[in-house]
Image: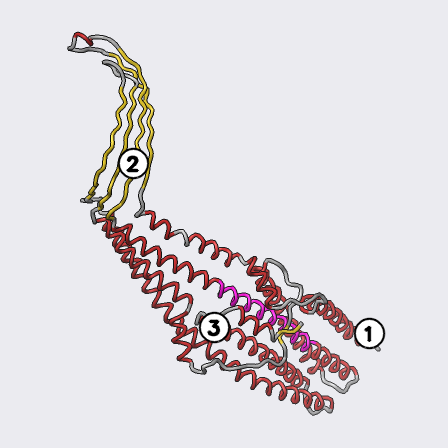
Amino acid sequence: MNTSDKRKIKPLNQWVRGCLSIGALWLSVVASPVQAEDLLDLYRSALESDPRLGSATYDHAAGAEVLPQAWAGYRPVVTLDYDYIDTSQDVLSSDNAAFAQGGASFPTHTWTLSVTQPIFRWANYKRIGQAKEELLQADAELIQAEQDLILRVSEAYLGALSAADELRFLDAERNAVAKQLELARGRELASIGRAVDRYDAEARMASVDADYAVAEVALRDAYEALYEMAGRDPQALATLQDDIDLQSPQPADDQYWIEAAMRNNPALVVQRHVVNVSRTEISRQNAGHYPTLDAVLRKNNRDTGGTLFGGGSEVETEELMLRLSVPLYAGGAVSSKTREAQARYQSSEQELTRLLRESRRQSRDAYWGVMNAVKRTQALNKAVAAQQATLDLRRAAYKSRLETAISVLDAERDLYSAKRDLARAKYDYLLNSLRLKALVGVLTQDDLNLVNDWLQS
């Protein structure tokens, strides 16, 4: 072997060593010998660690307090006030000759007990109904957050599997291209091949290497998405079985799912409560123009240790009154707050309209996503078989010098592209099935169990 031949083979050896090192890294990520974790394992971890669900849980606990606070506006208010006064007095001048001069110093103790019972306060009354609506809103938001976690964990998990598949297919394609490149080099050295075949293989190898670098970053990012929810790094993931039972949504009627989503979509349920709260807020703010009526019981005890003109006294007073307060003018604040509430109500109505239209689009998209994924999977299974047969024929033809190297390389790329599309179709089926159930508000852990049954360690 001459020196030029050795120079040609040296880069190939370096590339092979590079492939082995990267392949080892990939295997450590997706094929670790430790026990593979499945979807339910990570979901259980996310239940304990996901910050978004934790925040929603605390928000729900805070929201539960609005009703007791609202009822407090119609319950008695009891206050006890105590005053201690140290008084010093001197007579500076007086028309009474008996008290023309003198002074006194004495303490005064005063305590007052007041009980105020609201009788008519329209704003407080409306606030009770508004608080009940806010409580329902808080319940709906927590349900939405729980279903959102199921969907986010599933999306991240299947996204990680898809990213691992991408690396696996690229790795297989790269090995195939490497063999083709080695064959092209050997034929060129033996003077029975063309240099263009080697160049085609080298160009394809560079393209696959570039795609591989992108796929590595995507896989790491997919694992980070799982860490973001579960609070820990999964060591290995259970993968999807080759054969899964793909079923169309039942009933197979997109209008049924659209109507169900527009009734029960958790986001719509929450927004309907927001609209009701905003509508009540208009009346509550406008109540600033209304009079209020309270019953007030007051008991006062005043103990004076002395006076300027003689001894002290202790006086106890009880008062029972009805207090009517009629607002006349508050600088325009009440009218301004009412207009603000009206504007916010209109804004919430517009948001509800947007969510209705969005729900219609998303439910239709998810439904047809499931239907199309079933059809695509069936078609792509045939495509993979056909592409494999095509590749085998072209490899044989190339060895017989009836095909060019580029035709073999194209056939290899088409095969792995079909395999990649087949895997994605299965993931799309699972994700769209979960999304469709989330949109109609019936997504539960049982749906995760069904997906988990199709995973294998």
Mark carried by residue 437? 3
* Neighbour tally class for label 1: few under 14, some 14-19, many 20 plus, Cα within 10 Å: few
Q: Quadrant of residue 216?
A: bottom right
Whole-angstrom CA distance, mark 3 to mark 2, is 57 Å
Q: Counting residues from the N terminus, which is met first, the one under dot 3 or under dot 1?
A: 1
Picture residue at 40% right of the left edge, 79% below the top: 256
At mark 2, the secondary structure is: strand
Q: For the residue marked with disc 3, what is the amino acid?
A: Lys
Determine whether, in the image, residue 168 is placed left or right of residue 362: right
Q: Quadrant of residue 440?
A: bottom left
Instruction: Please state the extent of the stretch shown in magenta in the rendering.
Output: 146-174
Whole-angstrom CA distance, mark 3 to mark 1, is 66 Å
Q: For the residue marked with disc 2, what is the amino acid?
A: Ser
* Neighbour tally class for label 2: few under 14, some 14-19, many 20 plus, Cα within 10 Å: some
Q: Quadrant of residue 178?
A: bottom right
Residue that label 2 marks: 114
Picture residue at 39% right of the left edge, 67% below the top: 268
Mark carried by residue 3? 1
Picture residue at 31% right of the left edge, 29% below the top: 111
* Neighbour tally class for label 3: few under 14, some 14-19, many 20 plus, Cα within 10 Å: many
Prevailing secondary structure of the magenta residues: helix
Circles 3 and 1, Cβ within 8 Å, touching? The answer is no
Q: Counting residues from the N terminus, which is met first, the one under dot 2 or under dot 1?
A: 1
Mark carried by residue 365? none
Q: Foreground: 95 or 177?
A: 95
Q: Counting residues from the N terminus, which is met first, the one under dot 3 or under dot 2?
A: 2
Whole-angstrom CA distance, mark 2 to mark 1, is 107 Å
